[in-house]
Image (cartoon, rainbow, N blue to C red):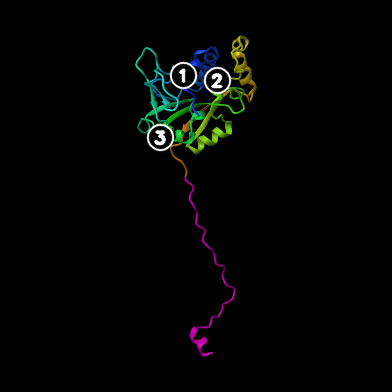
């Protein structure tokens, strides 16, 4: 179900990928203007977007699933990207403050298990941003971009998945209202598409950008035992004893 890391790299090196990265980066930055002093982790193929936080964060690393592959990041500097088992991240509990999921949930064979592992390594006050293909979007209907691979989600499906894995959605955004074509006029008008789509709340954005927080205390429903009430007898009833019954 996963797309190869080489295909992801090639997409983001082309003009359409560069514009897509700019538009999604804008949506991410609206939620997280900076990450000063924060420990930031990206999962999936997050490296086109982690540049927003790499200079200010206390540490900024990328984990790429084994099925996808890994590429060195950043180029020309000590590597901050690692190949991992997405269901067993090499971090202790509550190790990071912010987690960015890009090309992750829709590509995972078990997104619920991935989110539970994200919950484990996230600090109690931590936040998550997930960039997820929109089920109703045009970008999911073509396979010439990474957003056309894997399983897309509706908003209600994302909400259910997050709540099942002990997260609370706190903010929503969308990006990629433009069609997924590399024609010059489409790319030149990309920001106009974004402004119009966001202003009119159009339903065909390419991706959801959802922020969620970790549920530290989760209510567990208690089972109530109902006492069985025996109605009171209105008149006394005489029950013959065994001795009386024998004599008769």
- 162 or 4: nearer the viewer: 4
> In which quadrant will I find the C terminus?
bottom right
Magenta region, residue range: 220-248
Q: Answer yes or no: do the residues labelled 2 and 1 have beta carbons within 8 Å? A: no
**Residue for point 59% across, 73% down:** 234
Task: Give the residue number, with chain letter if any, for mark 3.
Answer: 120
**Residue for point 49% across, 16% down:** 10
Task: Give the residue number, with chain letter if any, for mark 2.
Answer: 145
Confirm whether the magenta stretch covers residue 224. yes
Q: Which mark is residue 6?
A: 1
- 237 or 77: nearer the viewer: 77
Q: Is residue 55 above or below residue 233?
A: above
Confirm whether the magenta stretch covers residue 27. no
Q: Tell me residue 208's x, y (percent).
A: 55, 26
- 65 or 190: nearer the viewer: 65
Q: Secondary structure at mark 3?
A: helix
Cα distance in 3D space between marks 2 and 1:
13 Å
Residue 232, image quadrant:
bottom right
């Amino acid at each position: 179900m996963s797309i190869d890391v080489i295909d992801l790299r090639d997409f983001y090196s082309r003009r359409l990928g560069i514009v897509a990265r700019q538009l999604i980066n804008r949506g991410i930055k609206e939620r997280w203007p900076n990450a000063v002093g924060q420990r930031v982790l990206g999962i999936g193929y997050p490296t086109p977007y982690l540049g927003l936080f790499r200079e200010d964060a206390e540490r900024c690393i990328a984990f790429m699933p084994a099925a996808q592959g890994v590429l060195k990041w950043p180029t020309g500097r000590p590597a901050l990207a690692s190949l991992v088992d997405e269901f067993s991240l090499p971090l202790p509990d509550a190790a990071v403050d912010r987690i960015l999921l890009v090309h992750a949930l829709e590509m995972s064979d078990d997104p619920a298990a991935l989110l539970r592992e994200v919950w484990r390594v996230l600090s109690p006050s931590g936040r998550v941003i997930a960039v997820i293909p929109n089920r109703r979007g045009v970008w999911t209907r073509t396979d010439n971009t990474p957003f056309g691979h894997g399983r897309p989600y509706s908003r209600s499906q994302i909400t259910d998945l997050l709540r099942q894995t002990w997260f609370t959605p706190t903010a929503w955004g969308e990006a990629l209202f433009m069609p997924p074509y590399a024609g010059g006029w489409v790319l030149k008008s990309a920001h106009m598409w974004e402004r119009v789509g966001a202003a009119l709340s159009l339903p065909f954005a390419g991706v959801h950008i959802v922020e969620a927080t970790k549920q530290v205390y989760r209510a567990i429903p208690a089972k109530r035992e109902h006492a069985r009430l025996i109605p009171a007898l209105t008149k006394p009833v005489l029950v013959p004893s065994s001795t009386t019954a024998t004599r008769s």
